[in-house]
Image (cartoon, rainbow, N blue to C red):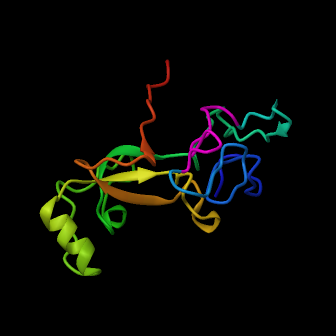
Amino acid sequence: MLPWGSALTGRVANYYRSFDPFEDVNEPFDGAGGPTTPVGFFNGSSSGGFQTGNSASPFGIQDMVGNIWEWCWDRYGPDYYSVSNAIDPNGPDESDFQVGNEAIVLAVTLDPNQRVVRGTAWNSRSPDVRLTNRGRYTELGRSYSIGVRLVRSPQQ
C-alpha cells in the first residue's frame, strides 16, 4: 500500500537504489547531498532537471514512506494488534518477545521499551516500502534513518 496509490518509483519516494538525485550508495551516503531527500521534495515539480511525481496522500500528507522511518508513540508487540482496541492502540506496557530470533529476544530483554517505527527509510529495499510496514527500535537508540513526524489533532 502506498499513500498516493500508484506504483513505487524513484520519482515519488527515497529508498535504497531509488536513484533520486540525492542518493549515494557508498558510505557515508552523503556524496550527492543525501542520504535523505529534502522534506516535500516529491511534490510533482522539477528540481535540477529531475522531474518528481506527486507523492501526497489523499489528505495532502507527503513523505509517508521512504526517506526516514518515523517514530510512533506505540510500544512494539509482535502480535499486539490482534488483541488491541480497534481505535488508537498504544501497544503493550512493555515489548514482549519470548520466542524467536535470539538476538531480538536478548535486545528486548535488555531494553523492553521498543517503540514502533513506520514508513521505511532511504536504506529500505523497494519490496519493503509500503505505508503499512511497521518496525521497532529501542527508545534509547539513535539512528540516522529514524525521525519524527509531528501530528496535530484536526480542527473541529
Image coords of residue 124 (percent x, y)? 55, 60
82 up-or-down from 4: above or below: below
Which residue is outermost to the left? 110
Task: Say which quarter of the image contains residue 81.
Answer: bottom left
Image coords of residue 121 (percent x, y)? 53, 52
> Which stretch did the figure color magenta?
29-41
Residue 81 colored in magenta in the image: no
Main secondary structure type of the part rendered in magenta: loop
Is 86 left or right of 109, judged from the image as shown?
right
Of residues 66 and 80, the one drawn nearer to the viewer in this rendering:
66
Residue 37 colored in magenta in the image: yes
Q: Quadrant of the N terminus?
A: bottom right
The residue drawn where x is 21% and y is 73% is 105
Is 138 left or right of 87, judged from the image as shown?
left
Image coords of residue 151 (percent x, y)? 44, 30
Image coords of residue 146 (percent x, y)? 42, 46
Is 12 left or right of 115, judged from the image as shown?
right
The residue drawn where x is 22% and y is 56% is 92
79 up-or-down from 117: above or below: below
21 up-or-down from 103: above or below: above
The residue drawn where x is 53% and y is 57% is 132
All told, the count of numbered labels is 0
The residue drawn where x is 56% and y is 52% is 122
